[in-house]
Image: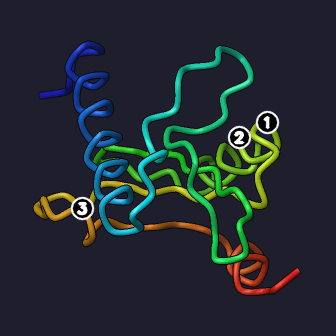
Amino acid sequence: MARSRASAKKAGTAFERLIADHLKHELGIEEIDRMPKSGALDKGDISNVRDSHGRLIAIECKNTTKMSLPQWTSQAHIEATNYAAHLGITIHKRHGTTAPGNQWVTMNVNDLIKLLKAT
């Protein structure tokens, strides 16, 4: 049975909260939180995440059984531009696994290189 719009929204919100709280706890950065909704210029779902060089990372969260990796990667790139972030990534639900640290992260290789480079 397919989810209703309301249950999908609730599941998405809960997943965003789970990931934001996990990042906040593991990185020790109190400012990490769910991103306030910003209308047409979406900036991602989690705010105030930075790489080891202090550069902002736009994070899009997905809690769905149907993976759409090309669309999600494009969405993360658009959100990174809107957020003036260094890059955008997607964190998506690994169904059957509740531990936030065991969820999936998707990015392309060029984004990985950007993340690992010092400049």
Q: Estimate how packed mark 1 is, as few (under 14), some (14 to 19) or many (20 or more) residues with alpha carbons within 10 Å.
A: some
Q: Residue at x 71, y 67 (%)?
A: 54
The residues tagged by marks 1 and 2 sit, at their Cα atoms, a distance apart of 5 Å
Q: Position of residue 22 (x, y in %)?
A: 29, 58
Q: Where is residue 118 in the image (x, y as percent from the top left)?
A: 82, 85
Q: Which of marks 3 and 1 is nearer the N terminus?
A: 1
Q: Which amino acid does label 3 sit on?
A: Pro
| 94 versus 119 height, above or below | above
Q: What residue type is labelled 2?
A: Glu
Q: Which residue is drawn at 38% across and 59% down?
A: 23
Q: Residue at x 33, y 68 (%)?
A: 26
Q: Position of residue 96 (x, y in %)?
A: 10, 61
Label 1 sits on a secondary structure element that is helix
Q: Residue 82 carries which label?
A: 1
| 34 versus 27 height, above or below | above
Question: Quadrant of the rendered structure where residue 42 is?
Answer: top right
Q: Is residue 81 left or right of residue 42?
A: right
| 41 versus 34 height, above or below | above
Q: Name the residue under label 3.
A: 100
Q: Earlier in the sequence, mark 3 or mark 2?
A: 2
Task: State the quadrant of the C terminus.
Answer: bottom right
Q: Where is residue 82 in the image (x, y as percent from the top left)?
A: 79, 36
Q: Mark 2 points at which residue?
A: 79
| Colour mapping | rainbow
The residues tagged by marks 3 and 2 sit, at their Cα atoms, a distance apart of 22 Å
Q: Is residue 37 left or right of residue 73?
A: left
Label 3 sits on a secondary structure element that is helix
The residues tagged by marks 3 and 1 sit, at their Cα atoms, a distance apart of 26 Å
Are the residues at dot 1 and dot 2 in contact (C-beta closer than 8 Å)? yes
Q: Estimate how packed mark 3 is, as few (under 14), some (14 to 19) or many (20 or more) residues with alpha carbons within 10 Å.
A: some
